[in-house]
Image: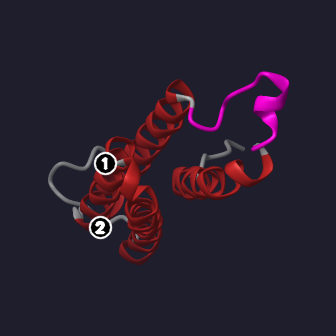
Amino acid sequence: MKRRINWDAWGIGASLACAIHCAMLPLFFSTLPLFGINIIHHTGFEVGMILLALVIGTYSLYHGFKRHHHSLLPMALFYTGFLFLVLKQFFIEYHNWLLIPAVLLIVVAHINNYRSCRVHNHAHADDCNH
C-alpha cells in the first residue's frame, strides 16, 4: 500500500510553524545572545524560513490546482500573503502589521485548497494528466 503525502497538511504545518517562530522565538530565545548565539534577527535564518514556506506552499497549491479543483483562488491568497511576508522583511517598523495578514492569508489559502480538493473530487479539465 502506497502512502501519500498530504501537502496541504505540510503547508498548513509550515505556515503555523512560521507563525509560532515569529511570535514565540523572541520570547523564548531572547537570552541566546548571552551565550553568543544570535538567531532572533538572523537574515539567513529568516530567508530560509520564507523560502521553505514558499516551496512547500507552491507545491501544495499547484498540486491541488492541477489535479483537483483548477481554482486560482488558493494561489492568489497564498501569494498575497507571501507578499506581506516578504514586505515585513523590508519594512521592519511595520513587522507585526504585515505579519498578521501574511500568516492569515497563507493559512486560509491552504485551508481553501484543502476544502476545494475534497469538494471537487477530481474535477477534471482538458489539461488533467490522470
* The N terminus - image quarter: top right
Whether residue 46 appears in magenta in the rendering, the answer is: no
Mark 1–mark 2 Cα distance, whole angstroms, equals: 35 Å
User: Percent x, y for residue 73?
Assistant: 25, 67
Categorize mark 2 by other alpha carbons within 10 Å: few (<14), some (14-19), many (20+): some
Q: Mark 1 is on which residue type? A: Leu
Question: Local crowd at mark 1 within 10 Å, few (<14), some, or many (≥20)?
Answer: some
Q: In this image, 44 relative to 38: left or right?
A: left
Which residue is label 2 attached to? 123
Question: As shown in the figure, which amino acid type bears the numbered disc 2?
Answer: Ala
What element does badge 1 sit on? Answer: helix
Return the residue at label 1.
87
Residue 39 highlighted magenta (yes or no): yes
Q: How is the image coloured?
A: secondary structure
Q: Earlier in the sequence, mark 1 or mark 2?
A: 1
**Of the two numbered discs 1 and 2 in the rendering, the one whose residue sits closer to the viewer:** 1
Depth check: 56 or 100 in front?
100
Q: Nearer the viewer, residue 108 or 83?
A: 83
Tag on residue 119?
Answer: none
- What range is drawn magenta here? 30-41
* Residue at 31% across, 48% down: 87
Spot occupied by residue 22 in the image (x, y as percentages of width and height): 59, 52
**Picture residue at 48% right of the left edge, 65% below the top:** 107
Q: Residue at x 49, y 28 (%)?
A: 43
* Side of 85 where 70 appears, left or right: left
- Identified at 25% across, 50% down, the residue is 128
- Of all residues shown, which one is farthest toward the right? 35
Q: Against 127, is 122 above or below?
A: below
